[in-house]
Image (cartoon, rainbow, N blue to C red):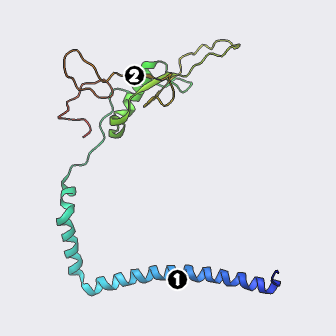
Amino acid sequence: PPLPGSVQSACSASRGQRRQSSVFSVAAMAVLKVLLAAVALCVAGPQSATAAASLLRRRGGSEVARTEPQYPPEPMGTMPEVDTDGSFKTKFDACQACRFKATGSCAMYKTCICHATNTYFGVTGLPEPSDQDNWHWSCGTEGGEKYQICYQSSGSSAGPVYRDNFGDEVDPLNPKCP
């Protein structure tokens, strides 16, 4: 049977109080932990904090501190102009845009295989538009079979030649992106 209204409101009030008290206890425990850590640091003294910091530097930080940061490479070529409709005018321009973007980032340089497609598709019953070149690029063929590869990265009649994903010869002993 349903509880009378006054009993029901008292039960829901006590549930709300329990939620508030559990939230309070979590916050109180967090504050208590911070205070205990501060007291432990004060009791141990500033010398032990300095010793701990120098120990950390000796154990692992020294190698990290001495390494030269790896900056992104300079993009290859120039970024072609985008047409007024937001696409590139030719397949070459779309491929060059892909190359420019992908060679300016080590992650893309190592993984991007440039593809391009013309997104113009004729429609039966409508007049042919004057602009039928709407080229876009992608780093793969996930867009479908209409995407064509931009650069051949393998194959040479002059013997073993190492090429990157953009068809350029590379020195395997001096990589652009290690």
User: Dot 2 corresponds to which residue?
Assistant: 150
Q: Position of residue 3 (x, y in %)?
A: 80, 83
Q: Nearer the viewer, residue 65 or 152?
A: 152
**In the displayed structure, would residue 133 be above or below residue 64?**
above
Residue receiving disc 1: 25
Q: Is residue 22 left or right of residue 46?
A: right
Q: Residue at x 52, y 25 (%)?
A: 87
Q: How many marks?
A: 2
| Residue 159 image position (x, y, % from top left) | 19, 18
SS class of the residue under badge 1? Answer: helix
Residue at the limit of the structure toward the front, as seen here: 1
157 w.r.t. 143: above or below: above
Residue 39: percent from the left, percent from the top? 33, 86
Crowding near pointer 2: few (<14 within 10 Å), some, many (20+)? many
Indicate the amino acid at tag 2.
Cys
Q: Quadrant of residue 106?
A: top left
- Please give the name of the residue rendered at 43% of the width and 30% of the height, measured from the top-left corner: 140
Whole-angstrom CA distance, mark 1 to mark 2, is 62 Å
| Residue neighbourhood size for the residue with mark 1, other residues' Cα within 10 Å, grouped as few (<14), some (14–19), many (≥20) | few
Q: Give the image location of residue 176, x and y in percent.
A: 25, 35
Quadrant in which the N terminus appears: bottom right
The answer to the question of whether label 1 and label 2 lie on touching residues, with beta carbons closer than 8 A, is: no
Q: Is residue 36 left or right of residue 20?
A: left
Question: Element under label 2?
Answer: loop
* Three-letter amino acid code of the residue under disc 1: Ser
Instruction: Give me the residue at 35% from left, 38% from top.
Output: 105
- The front one of 54 and 15 is 15
